[in-house]
Image: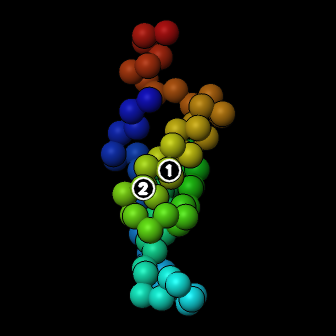
Amino acid sequence: MKIPDEDLKITSERKGSVGGQQVGCVKMDVTIEHIPTGIKATVGDQRSQLKNKMVALGMIEWGLIEIGYVYKEEQNIL
């Protein structure tokens, strides 16, 4: 499923590490909101902002599938 960019609001936030072996490593939390439905996904497990973004997008897509949200272009095909 391809979600149009104008339907997504993407924000990121830097998080410092607690300490120990991860001193000096910065994590990037990524929050993605699907504006038409209000579904939000926040991911900060990985150190990579790109990986966090891809996981959050997958969560948004799964949420849209769960509620049965279908884009107009796909409705014509079905």
Q: Kindly tell me whether residue 76 is visible in this rendering.
A: yes
Q: On the rendered structure, is 73 left or right of 16?
A: left
Question: Looking at the image, is 27 positioned above or below residue 52?
Answer: below
**Looking at the picture, how far across and down is residue 45, in whole percent?**
55, 64
Q: Amino acid at mark 1?
A: Val
Measure the alpha-carbon separation of dots 1 and 2.
Answer: 6 Å
- Is residue 9 at least partly visible in the picture? no
Q: Residue at x 61, y 40 (%)?
A: 63
Residue found at x 40% / y 37%: 3
Frontmost residue, 42 versus 16:
16
Mark 1 packing: few (<14 Cα in 10 Å), some, or many (20+)? some
The residue where tag 2 is placed is: 51
Residue 28 x %, y %: 44, 71
Which of these two is toward me, 1 or 21?
A: 21
**Picture quadrant where residue 77 is located:** top left
The reply to whether callout 1 and callout 2 are in contact (CB within 8 Å) is yes
As helix, strand or loop, the secondary structure at mark 1 comes to helix
Q: Is residue 59 above or below residue 17?
A: above
In the picture, the quarter occupied by the N terminus is top left
- Which disc number belongs to residue 55? 1
Kind of residue indicated by mark 2 = Lys
User: Residue at coordinates 50% horizontally, 82% vertically from top-left?
Assistant: 22
Residue 24: percent from the left, percent from the top? 42, 87
x, y percent for residue 73: 39, 21
Neighbourhood count class around disc 2 (C-alpha, 10 Å): few under 14, some 14–19, many 20 upward: some
